[in-house]
Amino acid sequence: MPTTATSQALPETAMGASAPDLLRVLMQRWRDDPSGTYRSWFLWEERLKNFRSIRRGIEQVVQEISAGSFGNLYRGSSLETVVSSVSEQRQIFKGADHAFLWKPKLRIPDIYESSDNQRAFGQLLHACSCCNTAEQVIAAIHRIDQLAIKGLGPAVANLLYFLHPTLMPPFNTAIVKGYNLLTGKKVKLGKWEEYLAMRTGILALNEKYRDLLSNDLGAIGGLLFDVGSGRYPVPPLEESDAARRAWEEDLAKVREEAAGVKKKLDAERENDRTHTNVQGWLRDLGKALGYEVWIAANDRRRPYLNGQLADGCVEALPDSIELGPGAEAVKLIDVLWLDKERKRVMAAFEVEHTTSIYSGIVRMLDLALGSDLHASEGLFLVAPDNREEEVRAQLMRPAFSRVADLKVRFLPYGELDKHREAIARFGSGIKGVHAIARVLA
């Protein structure tokens, strides 16, 4: 890749009038690619569900640092919990935890041994959680940058993205590489000033191609990630028909190579179908037991049997939830059983087929802690039988210290599938479900 002064001005001058066409071709191909980040991550329905839980996790980190109870270890901390949830956001965030792992030989990141640096980190997260403008976020970044805390660089921007997805783009090595390849710039890793300079360029690109991207900077972040990780060839710098044809041929190969990931995509679609089927079981069981049923707001139109998953279900939650704190998160709980008068939620079910247990727990906490009138008959994590130990391990994290009082139960697929028809036929209330579920804490 040339690095001359001419190439650094790629979007405006080096590629001349053809540049917008080539970038547009690339973006259109990327949007259509079933295995690119646009379709496999950005449009992934579970992606939006995790925003609330990650924000709650950041609040927990801030509270512990402020109270002096955060400690000096990453493993088992509230920070590990929230960063792990970020890392589970598919390939684009894989390895997001690396920057926060304590490296004793390098003594980085120095937020575990220095209480002053730890408090500064907490103040950054708190300031960015509370503000609502780019200027305020950038001011908070400049404040912590002046402290030169060892090992605490723009990898933190991944947390800021989940706080302000329309203001702060995500950040990792592949995204930086993709940005440099598409723009001819030489942004370096590890410095906040470099991240902020890249952010300015990303915003300009995002505005120029807004019709193919999104207000949410995760979209362009995904494009840059795919380019930087080598999935797509970079448009040629020189203006020539031969170079353009060669590039288009290379781009066409990406479509052919997509067949190689079909098996993985089929498995992911099968996971979605299984998740929907289990929601359907819970929907039908709830109705049979005399409850009104709510289906997660983003799942309501999913095909199920001969109709849609939300057929015959309530279309609104009680005002005490709709108008209360955490309402948006509660609406994303997979299945809720309500009393006949639709005044309160009796039971809540989070189906976690392959996705993060963490985000499901946080959504149920929003419901249970929002009012003592909700989920009086139980909170249930519904998952494959072999995930029970994983669920138990998650509930042992410090971030979930309040869960023990809520008696969250594990409802394995196998038991639900085996007994649901009998419970529906002979059961009364939720006793039958309690009988096949296991108390976790």
Image (spheres, rainbow, N blue to C red):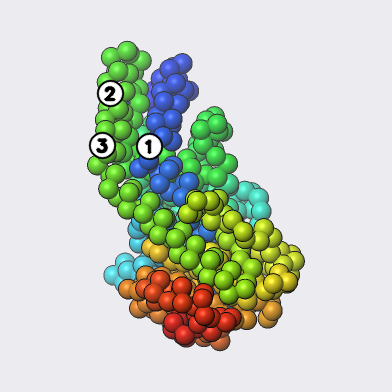
Q: Position of residue 211 (x, y in %)?
A: 55, 31
Q: Nearer the viewer, mark 2 or mark 1?
A: 1
Q: Hey, what amino acid is under mark 1?
A: Asp
145 versus 365 height, above or below: above
Q: Position of residue 109 (x, y in %)?
A: 40, 66
Q: Nearer the viewer, residue 438 or 69?
A: 438
Residue at (26% x, 30% y) in the render = 253
Q: Which mark is residue 257?
A: 3
Q: Nearer the viewer, residue 380 or 129?
A: 380
270 versus 242 height, above or below: below
Residue at (57% x, 71% y) in the render = 288
Q: Nearer the viewer, residue 4 or 314?
A: 314
Q: Position of residue 239 (x, y in %)?
A: 36, 15
Crowd tier of the residue under label 1, counting other residues whose Cα lies within 10 Å: few below 14, some 14–19, many 20 or above? some
Mark 3 and mark 1: Cα distance apart in space: 10 Å
Residue that numbered label 1 is attached to: 33
Q: Which mark is residue 249?
A: 2
Q: Nearer the viewer, residue 233 or 387?
A: 387
Would residue 346 appear left or right of 385 to someone viewing this image? right
Q: Hey, what amino acid is under mark 2?
A: Glu
Earlier residue among tags 2 and 1: 1
Crowd tier of the residue under label 3, counting other residues whose Cα lies within 10 Å: few below 14, some 14–19, many 20 or above? few
Q: Hey, what amino acid is under mark 3?
A: Glu
Which element is circle 3 on? helix
Residue at (45% x, 81% y) in the render = 437
